Amino acid sequence: MDLVALEVKMKNILVICTGNSCRSQMAEGFLEYYTNDNFQIFSAGIRAIGVNSKAIKVMKEIGIDISKHTSNLVEEYSEIDFDYIITVCDNAREFCPFIKGNGMRYHHNFPDPDSLFINLQEELNNFRKVRDMIKNYVIDFIDTELKQQIN
């Protein structure tokens, strides 16, 4: 008797913000960390302006390294069928181009941690505050939407 291996399609998650530099990068980092490689995680922006060094710093403080992440445009993923699409700012939700597939769509508007020009310590505290908000959102998202799919 021949055994036939069934190929299980790994589910894809896309996180989108305006510049793919802070919020979506942090969300991607948390999703990668908490889903234990059970999903393919992507992040993109309406524009791609580079991963923000302060986002890298505050994520590294809690043991999550996003320094190898790249800043990408949504259009770069036009051929990928996404199961979950999360916008993390109102601008991305409003101006996001069409995304292929029937993926479930979610939205939460997080403040832009890089929008205030203040001293470095206050700026880092602002990044930490937004980081923690995104962490709580991702944990809730996983508990409500993905828990049954994680080993």
Image (cartoon, rainbow, N blue to C red):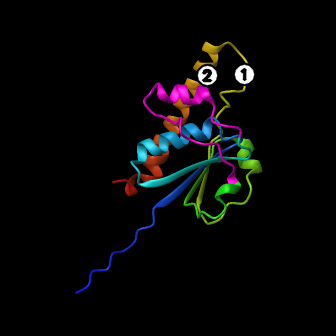
- Would residue 145 appear left or right of 118 to someone viewing this image? left
Q: Which mark is residue 126?
A: 2
The verdict on residue 62 being magenta is yes
Q: Locate the C terminus and report the quarter of the image it occupies.
A: bottom left
- Say which amino acid is labelled 2: Asn
**Does residue 145 show up magenta in the picture?**
no
Instruction: Pick whichever, 16 or 52, lies toward us.
Output: 52
Q: Secondary structure at mark 2?
A: helix
Residue at the spot 48% in from the left edge and 44% down from the top edge: 31
* Disc 2/disc 1 C-alpha distance (Å): 9 Å
Residue located at (53% from left, 35% from top)? 67
- Residue nearest the observer in this picture, 147 or 24: 24
Which amino acid type is shown beneath numbered disc 1? Leu
Mark with earlier residue (2, 1): 1
Along the viewing direction, whichever of 39 and 110 lies nearer the viewer: 39
Farthest right residue?
A: 95
What secondary structure is marked by label 1?
loop
Residue 115 locus on image (x, y percent): 72, 26
Query: Quarter-wise, where is residue 134 in the image?
Result: top right
Rendered image: mark on residue 116: 1
Q: Which residues are magenta?
A: 49-74
Using a 10 Å C-alpha cutoff, classify the residue at mark 1 as few (fewer than 14 neighbours), some (14 to 19) or many (20 or more).
few
- In the rendered image, residue 56, in percent from the top left (x then y), is placed at 55, 30
Residue in view at x 54 percent, y 60 percent: 83
Of all residues, the one furthest to the bottom in this rendering is 1
- The residue furthest front is 68
Q: Is residue 94 left or right of residue 146?
A: right
> Is 131 or 75 nearer to us in this picture?
75
Q: Are marks 2 and 1 in contact (CB under 8 Å)?
A: yes
Q: Is residue 123 above or below residue 113?
A: above
Q: List x then y, in percent, for residue 15.
A: 60, 48
